[in-house]
Amino acid sequence: MNRPLPTVPQHSPSRSIDSSRSAVTVDVHKVIHTYNLRLGGADVRLSITIEPSREFSHEHVFLLSLKTGAVERPISQPVYLKLSLDPRTLSFSVFAFPPRSSLPQGCLFSLRVWLRTGDIDHRLFSEDTLWIGKEPDFYSIEDATFARLRNSSTQTVLYKAAIGRGLIDIIVKWKAVFGQAYSLSLEYEGNGIGRVLFNDYILRLDCPPEDLDFVIYTIPVLSTPRGATHRIRVWLRVPTSSADSVPSLSSAGPSREYVYQRIWSTDDFKVGSSLDFTALGPKLIMAVPSGNGPKTLTSPSERSFYHDDGPAGAKQPTYGENTNGRKEVF
């Protein structure tokens, strides 16, 4: 049976942490195991939360979250297990290692969480793109162009970013969910056209959102036409000092310091400025607009012809390729 997996851990005892839902949930009894380690010079706390499954009886859901400084966020997808042991007696092996060289250096880690029962080990969580560091050298990234902060308020932060020869606005939006939980979204706008890049990214904060900053930069990707594709990286700068901060594993005294963690990225951002589509070559066939111009009418929505995965009722051709994207991942 396919299980509907929540996108974030639901740590709150009274309401769902998913801000898209307004329904009040019942209290749940949970057990939380915590582990501390240092990654990229930053003190990190990992919390493994175990709750009874609301969807499937006789099962428990395991959720993993990461806290550094004043911010806690979910890591990986929840895992459902049948559990006949007391959750308080469970033992975990939690470790990380640098999988390869990275830019900025010393900030990329692979994370593993294993559960041991007797002489049997069960792997629960695996994350190979955990980016975190105390003082990343962002300027070591060749061809990176950094977005500039233009305006900031309690709910919105506006950046200007260069995309080739043009400029776009990148807008960060905060929305209080309840208590210390906030929903984060990111969108862009260029000359009257905008798009949401991600939304409803849930964070738990021990500080006001105004205390957090972002490092956003773009990197051009070789493409035709030139300047049509870019990489985007979004890092969150987090103050390490807070009322409930992660205990330091070093002997250094308290000070106002920051930890950086990458929260979102894409290698396929398709926006450009005055692109030269004729560079695609002499075989290019360019359409021309109808001489009558656009028409306006009222009729059933064109969306009725589409499912989430394409036109309704149409079987997509394979052309010799696997159409199941999940199998390609493995």
Image (cartoon, rainbow, N blue to C red):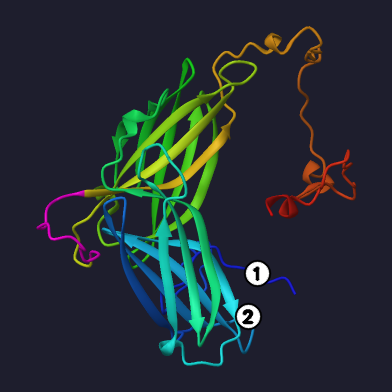
Percent coordinates x, y for residue 321 in the rendering: 83, 42
Q: How many marks?
A: 2
Circle 1/circle 2 CB separation < 8 Å: yes
Q: Type of residue at label 1? A: Pro
The dot on residue 198 is none
Image: magenta residue range:
245-257
Percent coordinates x, y for residue 23 in the rendering: 52, 73
Secondary structure of the residue carrying numbered label 2: loop
Q: Is residue 315 above or below residue 52?
A: above
Name the residue beneath numbered marker 1: 4
| Residue at the (49%, 72%) spot, across then down | 114
Residue 38 is drawn in which quadrant?
A: bottom left
Name the residue beneath numbered marker 2: 55
For label 1, the crowd category at 10 Å Cα-Cα, with few meaning under 14, some 14 to 19 and many 20 or more, is few
Q: Is residue 76 above or below residue 160?
A: below
Percent coordinates x, y for residue 236 in the rendering: 35, 46
Is residue 256 on the magenta stretch? yes
Q: Quadrant of the C terminus?
A: bottom right
| Residue at the (31%, 50%) spot, across then down | 40
